[in-house]
Image: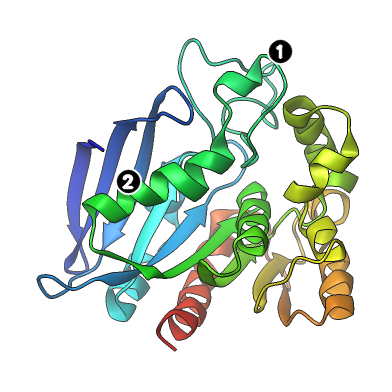
Amino acid sequence: MTIQTVSTNKSYGGVQGVYRHASQATGTDMVFSVYVPPHADGARLPVVWYLSGLTCTHANVTEKGEFRKACAELGLIFVAPDTSPRGADVPDDANNAYDFGLGAGFYVDATEAPFARNYRMWSYVTDELPKLVTGNFPVDAKQQSIMGHSMGGHGALTVALRNPHRYRAASAFAPIVAPSLVPWGIKALTGYLGPNKDAWRGHDTVALIEDGARFSGFLVDVGEADNFLKEQLKPELLEAACSKANIPLTLRRQPGYDHSYYFISTFMGDHLHWHAEKLKG
């Protein structure tokens, strides 16, 4: 599969690149970023997938996530896709709202018109993009982990729970853990998957755990000053579900931190060191 290089920059001895390709999953061009740390020729490296939140593209974490120093030290490839298909012909929210449509693909394969044609982000991040990255970068496909923020935290946890043998670690910043029960999730899942709530359960972390999905353990950070904590994130629901299912969960409530990349970048190094231990252990 062919990729086009948009830009490359040297950073901490490695290369931060941005790339474009024609996606079969979404029927659009898609842009993603990849940081490859310094490494010996021929070496295959562990890869960390990062899924971003509402309104974001690949650029938010690439420019503000402060992950490259740790990735260079730990020998981790870091991949950040976009959050939705984009283009003049891609349907958007009728009112141009930030929480549905462009920039808000919610990491599902839509079944409802008119979104089903392009909004296939589940297939994109779990199938098409991994094949593309593995074919073009020095990735060790046996050493993969996944993380994300907010909507992307939802994506990372659900992807891990449904693919427990592929990913050695999963973590999240301020994840939407029970989208079936909160406004952001109800809007997105109804719009993309329709009103049948049974169809939503495969894209709801808490519901997946209730229905028997298991993973080796999660690291989750939330900010106690996050404006979305009580209405949209509800980490206590994840805590209860993991406790009941005996899934190891490290849930850290960080005093004074909000929902922004100031929060994410502060604890990014912690997460990457945790991933590295799981990937190389």
Horizontal side of 83 relative to 213 (left or right) equals: left
Answer whether residue 182 is visible to the viewer in this image.
no
Question: In the picture, which quadrant includes the N terminus?
Answer: top left
Q: For the view shown, which residue lies furthest in the bottom direction?
A: 281
Viewer-closest of 154 and 138: 138
The residue singled out by tag 2 in the image is 132
Q: Residue at x 66, y 29 (%)?
A: 110
Measuring from the top left, give residue 170's x and y in whole percent: 58, 69
Q: Indicate whether 142 appears above or below 9.
A: below
Q: Mark 2 belongs to which amino acid?
A: Leu
**Label 1 element class:** loop
Measured Cα–Cα span from mark 1 to mark 2 = 33 Å
Which sits earlier in the primary sequence, circle 1 or circle 2?
Answer: 1
Question: In the picture, which quadrant includes the C terminus?
Answer: bottom left
Answer whether residue 210 is visible to the viewer in this image.
yes
The residue singled out by tag 1 in the image is 94
